Structures are given as C-alpha cells and as structure tokens.
Image (cartoon, rainbow, N blue to C red):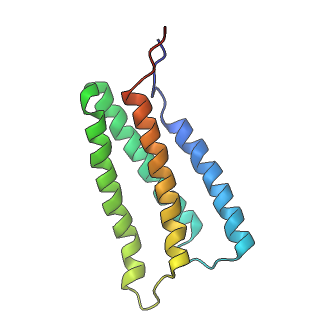
Amino acid sequence: MKKSFQNPYIPILIFSLVVFLIHWGLDSALSIITYYSISSIYLFHVISALAVAGIIHLVYVNSKDYAGYAFMGTSLLKMLAAILFLLPGFLSEEKPSFANILNFFVPYFLFLIFEAIQVIKLINPKEEN
C-alpha cells in the first residue's frame, strides 16, 4: 500500500515555484505596479502552506479522523493571517488598487485549492486492488 502524504513539502514547493513564475511573468508583461511585492506575497503563501501541511500531517499521524477538522481550522487561521497581512495597506493613506488585491487573492485561492486537494487525497486514499 502506498503511503500518502509522506512528504507534503516537496509538492508545495514545486507548486509554489510554478505559480510564482507564471505570476511573475504575467506581472512583468502587464506592468502592474503592486502595492505588495510579489516576493512578499509568495513568502506569505509558501510559509502558510508549509505550516498548514505540517499541522495536518501532525494531526493525521496522531489521529487520522481529525485531519479534515485540522484543515478547516488551519484554513481559518490562514484567512485571519491574510487579513493581518493586508491590513497595513488598507489602513494607509495610499490604498492598494483592486489589481493589487487580486495579486494577493488569486494565489491565495490557488494555494487553498491545492491544499484542499492534498487533504482530500490524504483523507480518501485510493484502495489498491
């Protein structure tokens, strides 16, 4: 039987690199001036994705039944962290534009979808015949 979620960090890093390169290419081609730098946005996403994967892996090893609940809890914490990340921009005199907000939230939801797929694979492993 294949052990799923054995090393959750490598797929996250590969996914992050691919999404970062696509985003960087689009940003440089469209010349969108960002309020938040792309490197800080992806640093936030990578650190939060690695933290979520680590917590879910820890919960899964100790109690497999609660891995889904751990994902929901860490997703809530990640959402609160995203608000804290964006808060200085909203409180400043120069507000970020809608395009700058999209520069943060498009990768946020891509990472969230990627994490959800990884957790679904972990919770519902395919049975081998």
As drawn, 22 above or below 73: below
* Whole-percent x, y for residue 42 in the image: 53, 59
Left or right? Give the position of 10 relative to 55: right
As drawn, 102 above or below 119: below
Looking at the rendered structure, the number of numbered marks drawn on it comes to: 0
Q: Residue at x 47, y 56 (%)?
A: 109
Q: Residue at x 40, y 87 (%)?
A: 92
Can residue 84 be seen at all in this image of the molecule?
Answer: yes
* Whole-percent x, y for residue 61 in the image: 32, 26
* Whole-percent x, y for residue 33 in the image: 62, 79
Q: Residue at x 38, y 64 (%)?
A: 82
Furthest residue in direction bottom, as rendered: 93
Can residue 46 be seen at all in this image of the molecule?
Answer: no
Left or right? Give the position of 47 relative to 10: left
Q: Which quadrant of the figure has residue 89?
A: bottom left
Furthest residue in direction right, as rendered: 29
Residue toward you, 51 or 77 = 77
Q: Which quadrant of the figure has residue 123?
A: top left
Left or right? Give the position of 40 relative to 21: left
Furthest residue in direction front, as rendered: 129
* Whole-percent x, y for residue 40 in the image: 52, 65
Q: Which quadrant of the figure has residue 127?
A: top left
Q: Residue at x 40, y 36 (%)?
A: 119
As drawn, 58 above or below 91: above
Residue toward you, 9 or 100 = 100
